[in-house]
Amino acid sequence: DTAVSQTPKYLVTQMGNDKSIKCEQNLGHDTMYWYKQDSKKFLKIMFSYNNKELIINETVPNRFSPKSPDKAHLNLHINSLELGDSAVYFCASSGSGSRGETQYFGPGTRLLVL
Amino acid sequence: DAKTTQPPSMDCAEGRAANLPCNHSTISGNEYVYWYRQIHSQGPQYIIHGLKNNETNEMASLIITEDRKSSTLILPHATLRDTAVYYCIVKQGAQKLVFGQGTRLTINP
């Protein structure tokens, strides 16, 4: 009954490859996010989708393309992987409410580009 | 950029209360104070949040000063499993979470 799940947990790949990371939430939330945590442990927002519409797009290379087939899923596709893409990627989701909108995170996908 | 300031590290003895301070002097009236923690590269875990009143749940208590310029997260009886990086974040509505460096809390046996 995991609330926010990601697959795969680990991903090791060669430079130049294309890969996808999947995220699913069963919380009934309308908004989903992708965050990146680099080797220095800084967590930064990449994208946010609300009801399948892109609402936040930080300065991310266009090799990264989020795709939301429905509001329970937000997948991250990365083209032409580079060494600097190695990081932990976290998916999150949030609902709405009068007391703010709490985000709940998945377990992360550890990407290593060789 | 993070709008909060936290000490980089703290230590606490197991069984004692851990009090983690956070300064957010530029907080605006409709911004909430959120606390998350990250245990050893797991996904950030939501702890608690509040607007102006003190809050308590099964994990922690949140004390917000009357002027809302600072807050304290209290873990009443810290255990070794509470060792983590704790993040204090101010956020309004559906805004993104902006993580700072947080406080690395070490619980010592």
Image (spheres, rainbow, N blue to C red):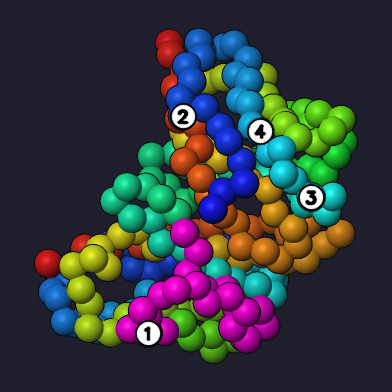
Labelled pair 4, 3 in contact (Cβ < 8 Å): no
Q: Chain of mark 2?
A: B
The mark that comes first in sequence, 4 or 3, is 4
Residue occupied by mark 1: A62
Residue A17: in magenta span: no
Residue type (three-letter) at the residue carrying disc 3: Ser
The answer as to whether the residues below labels 1 and 3 share one chain is no
Q: Nearer the viewer, residue A93 or B35?
A: B35
* Residue range (magenta): A44-65
Q: Residue furthest bottom?
A: A69
Element under label 3? loop
Would you call the spot at circle 3 few (<14 residues within 10 Å), some (14-19), or many (20 or more)? few
Q: Alpha carbon of mark 2 to alpha carbon of mark 3: how far? A: 24 Å
Query: What label does residue B8 carry, if any?
Result: 2
> What residue sits right under mark 4 in the picture?
B23
The vertical placement of B9 against B3, above or below, is: above
The residue shown at (50%, 10%) is B13
Tell me, yes or no, whether dots 2 and 3 are on the same chain.
yes
**Front residue of this view, candidates B19 and B75:** B19
Q: Amino acid at mark 1?
A: Asn
Q: Mainly helix, strand or loop, the magenta region?
A: strand
Q: Which mark is residue B28?
A: 3
For residue B5, side relative to residue A75 (left or right): right
* Nearer mark to the viewer, of 1 and 3: 3
Judge whether residue B60 can be spotted in this image. no
